[in-house]
Image: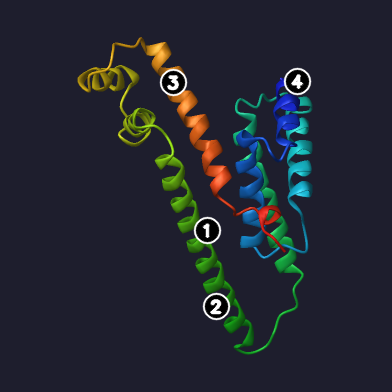
Amino acid sequence: MRERFDLEFQALLDRNNPDTRSIWCFVERTIRQYQLGGDITADEVLMEAYVRGIRQIVTRQKMIVNPLGWIRLTANYIILEYSRTVRRNVPLETGGAAEAKLAVAGEMDRLVREEEIEANIQALYAALAQLSPREQEILLWRHVDDLPWCEVGKRLIDCGEADVNEPALRQQGYRALVRLRKLFHALNVQDPDDKVA
């Protein structure tokens, strides 16, 4: 149990790994969302998630089935807990000044989230456009239309392609998804480390 968790976490430490880069971006984006940029770093959040994971595996004898998903969810909880602690320690202001600041901060958070979502959507469309038409169709039928692999195979045959067995089709779909993820991360410059200061 612990070996798999350690291996997944070791891969996570490589920020250039396309499979784990989305977690780094998610953690850094969430820290910015809660306006904790100067208070806590993504490294600290992920180290705390690792400690909690080891504690769950060793002390509580609970298996973590999907380590990357578990780390992402736990990192979100850690940031939320830290945000609550920071807010508890902020001195109260009198009158409407505090409410006005909260309203402005809330509106800024909403605008930042909308901009990030729009940038992610644009990067996803651009990455999808770089795939071959066949890869696009496989991904869209499988992940957007939610068709089973056998139905995806039938649609490919209807388009004039040769019959492909289901395991081979699954592998082709997986490769297309990995390629899409790499293209998306190459196009999506939301990570603060990628921005020129």
Indicate the quadrant containing the N terminus: top left, top right, bottom left or bottom right: top right
Q: Which residue is mark 4?
A: 3
Q: Position of residue 16 (x, y in %)?
A: 69, 39
N-term-proximal mark, 4 vs 1: 4
| Residue 116: image tag | 1
Q: Position of residue 70 (x, y in %)?
A: 63, 35
Q: Which residue is mark 3?
A: 172
Amino acid, disc 3: Gln
Q: CA distance from mark 4 to mark 1?
A: 35 Å
N-term-proximal mark, 4 vs 3: 4
Q: Position of residue 151 (x, y in %)?
A: 27, 20
SS for tag 3? helix
Q: Which residue is mark 2?
A: 103
Q: CA distance from mark 2 to mark 1?
A: 20 Å
Q: CA distance from mark 4 to mark 3?
A: 29 Å
Q: CA distance from mark 4 to mark 2?
A: 46 Å
N-term-proximal mark, 2 vs 1: 2
- Can residue 70 be spotted in the picture? no
- The quadrant where residue 17 appears: top right
N-term-proximal mark, 3 vs 2: 2
